[in-house]
Amino acid sequence: MDLLANLGDGFLIAMTWQNLLLALMGCFLGTIMGALPGLGPSNGVAILIPLAFTLGLGPTPSLILLTSVYYGAMYGGRISSILLNIPGDEPAMMTCLDGYPMAQKGRAGEALALSGIASFVGAFFATWGLVLLAPQLVRVALLFGPAEYFALFTLAFATLGGIAATNQAKSAFAAALGLGLAMIGVDTQTGVPRLTFGEVHLYDGIDFLIAIVGLFALSEVFVFIEHRGTTRDISTKAPPAIGRIVPSWSLIRSCIPTMGRTTVLGFIAGVLPGAGASLGSFISYSMEKRLVDKEKTFGTGDPRGVAAPEAGNNAAAGGALVPMLALGVPGSGTTAVLLAVLLALNITPGPLLFTQNPDVVWGLIAALFIGNVMLLAMNIPMVGLFTRVLLIPPRILMPVVAMISFVGIYGISGSPFELLMMVGFGLMGWVLRKLDVPLVPVILGTLLGNEMEVNFRRAVEISNGDYGVLVGSPLAIGLWTVALVGFVLPILVGGRIKRRMHMSRDEEGALSD
């Protein structure tokens, strides 16, 4: 009953005209961001962070806007996948397998509407999973001491490369780089400046919002400049005709069991550290194909092949919010960006969030329910509008991204030095992307580095210098074990999973040709 009462209070907070308008705007902008290949949820949220702070929004409205962008981008990723066979981001890759063949058969509208319905089902029930699971996880987290938190942060670094990662060495390098960036500034315990090189602007450390906007948003601009006029500019490829938009009831009914099964799989994948929406989408499609594809119709335009990955990846998006809110550890790249927003608003995610800031967390959860309904209502009748977004040339889009980044960061900091830092992070992100080094561990290191150091020092000081305290409890040993397995498992099976994901799409592309 307490859960329902808290959720009711959350709806009272979320259903003000300002919050509803922000949710609607976030859903609309997020869908556009998701539809544009190459941007995706992480970049979409990062690009709009400066807007949220420039508008002077409070904690709850800011999070409502940005989480609506997050969910909207997960919805929007399917549009270019179905119409152009170009996934908006990696989780949408599996949607290409049956979505594009449906579009080639003149059923693009049905495929888009069905994927919107599946996305709603996955996200809606995943949000209920968040409501039920996060408070229970909080009770476990209250047992954590400094040693357990240090092990938990290590687990986050060990697993955020993802189960489908192909090069854990690059993920480890990125995490080390992020930890190094977190060390810049005055040491809170000794008062000694570290890695500041005499620059007073660095005494307070690096603002992680600057790092995020630079690494994600500006690096995308630099990538566009590098590839200008090449195949990255897809605006010349016209999407096919939409055709009938509203799918028949018999088509929806045939996909209901698929949506139910893949929602559960996707949610579990989202909650697990390092799995995320990519693996949720892949597992959902693969398991459903094995279960129901008796006539070998998957890959040729089977509607169930559209519903499965869409329900799975949107359920994973909701599941990834569970560890972020309950433990303060992001379950995906986009939730790492949302974690930075919480910290910038002086809100510490974790077990005390539900007691110290109940208005924020329950208002956010209520807004997720509202945003899902908005997205479903928006995506079916406005399919034609969103498909026209694909015709926007990147030469127009990227200057807008750069303008929002510069104006927003200057509005937050008012410092030209921090604008130069943002450009530096943009160049760093561009170089790291060229070297195929993941950006998310860099952000995670910048976010969690100081907390990780503080908990390490605290644990060792409490034990009078005995480092054995780091593995001194069953809970800490369990976390270290999961971290070790999470780091080693991608080395053993990550390449195989990645190859299967790309092989499935390549085989489908060969068949469609």
Image (cartoon, rainbow, N blue to C red):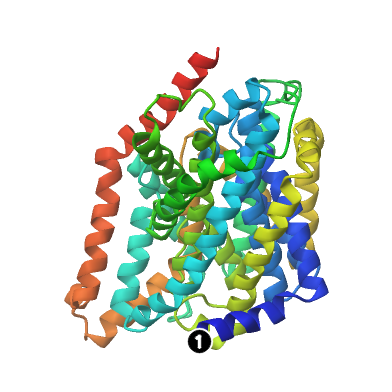
User: Does 337 sit above or below residue 84?
Assistant: below
For the C terminus, the image quarter is top right
Q: Position of residue 211 (x, y in %)?
A: 60, 56
Q: In which quarter of the image is residue 375?
A: bottom right
Looking at the image, can residue 416 be seen? no
Q: In which quarter of the image is residue 87?
A: top right
Q: Nearer the viewer, residue 406 or 465?
A: 406
What residue is rendered at 76% in x and 21% in y? 236
Q: Name the residue under label 1.
A: 1
Looking at the image, can residue 190 be seen? yes
User: Does 85 sit above or below residue 466?
Assistant: above
User: Does 488 sit above or below residue 492?
Assistant: below
Q: Where is residue 159 in the image (x, y as percent from the top left)?
A: 35, 54
Labels in figure, total? 1
What residue is rendered at 48% in x and 64% in y? 182
Inspect the image, locate mark 1, and give the three-letter code of the amino acid beneath it: Met
What residue is rendered at 34% in x and 68% in y? 152
Taking the image as shown, residue 15 lies to the left or right of residue 494, namely right
Q: Which of 333 and 292 is in front in this view?
A: 292
Taking the image as shown, residue 274 lies to the left or right of residue 256, namely left
Q: Which of 206 and 335 is in front in this view?
A: 335
Taking the image as shown, residue 494 lies to the left or right of residue 441, namely left
Q: Where is residue 223 in the image (x, y as percent from the top left)?
A: 64, 34
Disc 1 secondary structure class:
loop
Q: Position of residue 368 (x, y in %)?
A: 63, 65
Judged from this view, the residue extending furthest toward the top is 513
Residue density around tag 1, few if under 14, some if 14–19, many if 20 or more, within 10 Å? few
What residue is rendered at 73% in x and 37% in y? 245
